[in-house]
């Protein structure tokens, strides 16, 4: 039987594990009872980690356990085999490990130790920020607070871009594709996306035949006629740019563009003599009998009457 540990100089205690299991690194001091039972005191030996290792806890600076307020229950991070490797519940700190961070080796962030490690994205990802070319983060002056656009998911995507309006205002019909970045950034190319109407809508421009924009030489600046809400209704300053048809004597004298633009394939061509009183050549000839150089054709009509007025 084991002896009563109260004053005997030597002995053994076969049932030690019934009171405290000796395992891991502790097995190396199994025969050195005094390592734990200091001064031969068997009655008041602590059975908690900190009871024996509080000096180790207090002296640890990487990271500093005391200032960080780590638990004194050593087994929450360490095993009895050795202090290292250690297991640490990072999610109890002010920087929880999520996404790609959850599989990162400790040394990738704590390369210079554990104390004073920054929790700012840019302090670890400056190289990523500077090398990003799609889009170029530095030339665009994007924020180096990665979390404004990115999550911790691997590959930096998906990403949001709350400051899109600082570069191109999304409004009107464009708001319907706000979440479909590829609709404008084809193939995931964010560096070379056009910011002009025609840059995205040249196919619409070329395919439009009522009126045919291309052959008629209409501006490729869509906003000169259209809004971002929809292609129609469209505004076209026909009176100011070409000929008054919304004012003056020609107001309400037509229904369709093709009333005057008789060649639906080319709106550069027009006719003044195929509608209302002008289609009576004899009458028009008589009205112009005193006009030198008079000709009965539409171009001649326009040359003399560019505003539609009789004189």
Image (spheres, rainbow, N blue to C red):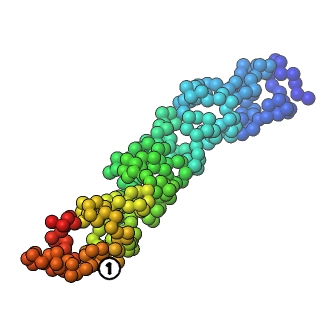
Residue furthest to the right: 1
Labels in figure, total: 1
Q: In this rendered view, identify the residue nearer to me: 118 or 75.
A: 118
Residue 119 image offset from top left, x and y in percent: 49, 38
In the image: residue 5, left or right of residue 302: right
Q: Is residue 147 above or below residue 55?
A: below
Q: Is residue 103 visible?
A: yes
Q: Position of residue 90 (x, y in %)?
A: 60, 39
Query: Eyeballing the image, is 168 above or below 281?
Result: above
Tell which of 180 and 109 is nearer to you: 180
Left or right side of 89 for 67: left
Q: Is residue 49 above or below residue 111?
A: above
Q: Quadrant of residue 288?
A: bottom left
Q: Closer to the camera, 269 or 306?
A: 306
Which residue is drawn at the image coordinates 54% and 48% (left, top)?
152
Q: Quick check: 258 left or right of 279?
A: right
Quarter of the figure with residue 289: bottom left
Q: Which residue is mark 1?
A: 263
Quarter of the figure that contains the N terminus: top right
What residue lies at 58% left-to-right and 40% top-to-bottom?
96
Seen in the picture, residue 56 relative to 301 is either above or below; the reply is: above
Which residue reaches farthest bottom?
A: 282
């Amino acid at each position: 039987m084991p002896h009563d540990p109260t004053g005997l100089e030597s002995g053994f205690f076969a049932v030690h594990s019934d009171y405290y299991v000796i395992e891991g690194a502790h097995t190396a001091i199994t025969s050195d009872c005094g390592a734990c039972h200091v001064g031969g005191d068997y009655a008041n030996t602590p059975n908690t980690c900190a009871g024996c290792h509080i000096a180790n806890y207090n002296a640890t600076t990487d990271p500093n356990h005391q200032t960080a307020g780590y638990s004194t229950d050593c087994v929450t991070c360490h095993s009895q085999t050795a202090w290292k490797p250690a297991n640490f519940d990072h999610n109890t700190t002010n920087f929880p490990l999520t996404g790609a961070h959850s599989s990162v080796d400790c040394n990738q962030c704590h390369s210079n130790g554990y104390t004073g490690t920054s929790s700012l994205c840019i302090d670890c990802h400056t190289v990523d920020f500077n090398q990003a070319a799609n889009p170029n983060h530095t030339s665009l002056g994007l924020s180096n607070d990665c979390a404004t656009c990115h999550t911790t998911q691997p590959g930096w995507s998906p990403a949001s871009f709350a400051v899109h309006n600082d570069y191109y205002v999304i409004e009107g019909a464009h708001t319907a594709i706000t979440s479909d970045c590829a609709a404008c950034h084809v193939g995931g190319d964010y560096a070379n996306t056009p910011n002009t109407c025609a840059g995205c809508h040249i196919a619409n421009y070329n395919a439009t035949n009522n009126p045919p924009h291309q052959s008629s030489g209409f501006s490729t600046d869509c906003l000169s006629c259209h809004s971002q809400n929809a292609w129609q209704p469209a505004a076209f300053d026909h009176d100011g740019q070409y000929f008054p048809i919304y004012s003056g004597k020609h107001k309400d004298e037509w229904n369709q563009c093709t009333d005057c633009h008789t060649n639906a394939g080319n709106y550069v061509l027009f006719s003044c003599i195929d509608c209302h009183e002008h289609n009576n050549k004899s009458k028009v000839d008589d009205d112009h009998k005193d006009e030198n150089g008079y000709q009965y054709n539409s171009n001649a009509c326009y040359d003399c009457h560019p505003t539609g007025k009789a004189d």
